[in-house]
């Protein structure tokens, strides 16, 4: 078995990292809990791509 991790980042308009979440590789990129944790302390608009 291979174990892995995923790093999800939120950056501002200057490219600075303002939030991050580290999940297991088996967690789906579409998991709404990832976005909830990323956006917990953010305000404004959150944009994402389809992957």
Image: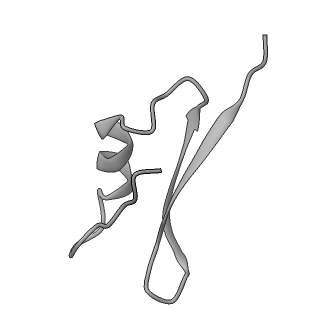
Task: Report the label total.
Answer: 0
Q: Is residue 35 above or below residue 13?
A: above
Q: Is residue 21 above or below residue 43?
A: above
Q: Is residue 10 above or below residue 23?
A: below
Q: Quadrant of the N terminus?
A: top right
Q: Residue at x 30, y 64 (%)?
A: 41
49 to the left or right of 20: left
Q: Position of residue 45 (x, y in %)?
A: 23, 72
28 to the left or right of 4: left
Question: Is 47 in front, or is 21?
Answer: 47
Q: Residue at x 36, y 61 (%)?
A: 48
Question: Is 26 in front, or is 16?
Answer: 26
The residue most toward the front is 50
Q: Residue at x 66, y 35 (%)?
A: 5
Q: Position of residue 40 (x, y in %)?
A: 29, 56
30 to the left or right of 3: left
Q: Position of residue 10 (x, y in %)?
A: 46, 65
Question: Is 50 in front, or is 35?
Answer: 50
32 to the left or right of 28: left
The residue most toward the bottom is 14
Q: Residue at x 28, y 67 (%)?
A: 46
**Colouring:** one colour
The residue most toward the top is 1
The image quadrant of residue 34 is top left
The residue most toward the left is 44
């Amino acid at each position: 078995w291979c174990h892995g991790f995923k790093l999800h980042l939120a950056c501002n308009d200057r490219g600075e990292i303002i939030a991050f979440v580290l999940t297991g590789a088996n967690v789906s990129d579409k998991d709404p809990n990832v976005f909830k944790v990323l956006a917990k302390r953010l305000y404004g608009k959150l944009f994402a791509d389809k992957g």
